[in-house]
Image (cartoon, rainbow, N blue to C red):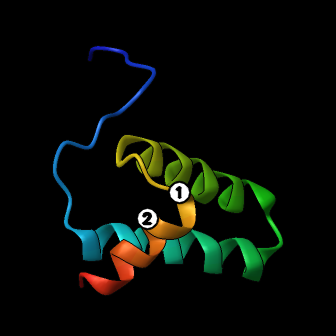
Amino acid sequence: MQEFDKISISEISKQDMLTILEALDYTGRSTNKQHYIVLKNNIIKELSSLAESSEEEFIKYLKSHI
């Protein structure tokens, strides 16, 4: 098996991405394990950067287009 350090998501629906982000947030709050929240925040930061928007604008975009 080939080893890799990063995984790229080329196509995922907005609804699926929002579900993933909400699941990470819920799990982080429910378990008090900060790494879930950090992962959620890192994903939002990267995707909002790619979309050339603020993090808040990106989340609003996801929520309004499902």
Inspect the image, locate mark 2, and give the three-letter code of the amino acid beneath it: Phe
Question: Where does residue 10 sit, x and y in percent of width and height?
Answer: 19, 42
Task: Name the one closer to the observer, 41 or 7.
Answer: 41
Task: Name the one closer to the observer, 31 or 45.
Answer: 45
Q: Which mark is residue 37?
A: none
Q: Residue at x 35, y 74 (%)?
A: 62
Q: Is residue 12 above or below residue 28?
A: above
Q: Residues within 10 Å of mark 2 (few under 14, many from 20)?
A: some
At mark 1, the secondary structure is loop
Task: Name the one closer to the observer, 55 or 35.
Answer: 55
Inspect the image, locate mark 1, and give the three-letter code of the amino acid beneath it: Ser
Q: How many discs mark residues in the rendered view?
A: 2
Q: Residue at x 28, y 14 (%)?
A: 2
* Residues at discs 1 and 2 in contact (Cβ within 8 Å): yes
Residue 30 placement, left or right of 9: right
Question: Where does residue 19 sit, x and y in percent of width and height?
Answer: 39, 77
Question: Where does residue 66 sit, x and y in percent of width and height?
Answer: 24, 85
Q: Residue at x 36, y 15 (%)?
A: 3
Q: Residues within 10 Å of mark 1 (few under 14, many from 20)?
A: some
Q: Residue furthest top?
A: 2
Question: Where does residue 61 sit, x and y in percent of width and height?
Answer: 35, 73
- The residues bearing labels 1 and 2 have C-alpha atoms spaced at a distance of 6 Å
Q: Is residue 59 above or below residue 41?
A: below
Q: Which mark is residue 54?
A: 1
Q: Is residue 32 above or below residue 38?
A: below
Q: Which residue is mark 2?
A: 58
